[in-house]
Amino acid sequence: MTRRPRGFTLLELLIVVAIIAIGTVGVGLALRDSGQAALENQAQALAAMLETARAQSRASGVPVQWQPTSDGFAWGGLDNSGPDPLPTRWKTPGIRAQTTAPVLLGPEPLVGAQRIVLWRDEQPQMRLSVATDGVRPFTVAPEEASP
């Protein structure tokens, strides 16, 4: 008499559960908040631009100033007419920036502590800070939203 199999083995069930778990994690990562990702990407890009301007200031001996504008930002003291000019607008619409004073970059190796707070119009509670202590490069960190 042959036995007819009934149901699934425990191993088969565990494999199916593992496949579902891996798929769920993949979907969760793929559906990451695009607004938050855009803000993080823009903050990283700004940190890189500020470091580039800082290096250009040191090389030319001319102080460079960065400040936010209503539709982007402006560079002062920077010859931005070369083959690779630094941008003056955000890649993602709706990004806003705030500083207590214009950000001064060089030409001295040591500058004062500088901080720029970035947020999106759609999510003002999510803020990132692009800052330096004046010695180290600009870094990006979460910023507490002001009340």
Image (cartoon, grey):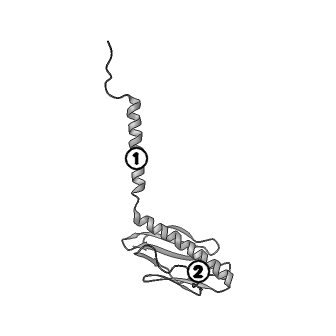
Q: Quadrant of residue 133?
A: bottom right
Q: Quadrant of residue 21?
A: top left
Q: Amino acid at mark 2?
A: Pro
Q: Position of residue 116 (x, y in %)?
A: 51, 76
Specify the quadrant that holds the C terminus: bottom left
Residue 29: tell me if it is visible. Answer: yes
Q: Position of residue 39 (x, y in %)?
A: 45, 69
Name the residue at 59% across, 87% down: 77
Q: Earlier in the sequence, mark 1 or mark 2?
A: 1
Q: Amino acid at mark 1?
A: Gly
Specify the quadrant that holds the N terminus: top left
Find the distance from the CA under tag 1 to the CA under tag 2.
Answer: 45 Å
Give the residue pinned by disc 2. Answer: 83
Q: Quadrant of residue 92?
A: bottom left
Q: Position of residue 61 (x, y in %)?
A: 68, 85
Label annotation for residue 23: 1
Label annotation for residue 91: none
Extreme residue toward the front, this view = 83
Residue 146: tell me if it is visible. Answer: no
Mark 2 element type: loop
| Circle 1 or circle 2, nearest the eye | 2
Between 127 and 28, the one nearer to me in the picture: 28
Q: Is residue 57 left or right of residue 147?
A: right
Name the residue at 67% across, 81% down: 58
Relative vertical location of residue 9 with respect to residue 68 in this rendering, above or below: above
Q: Position of residue 4 (x, y in %)?
A: 31, 20
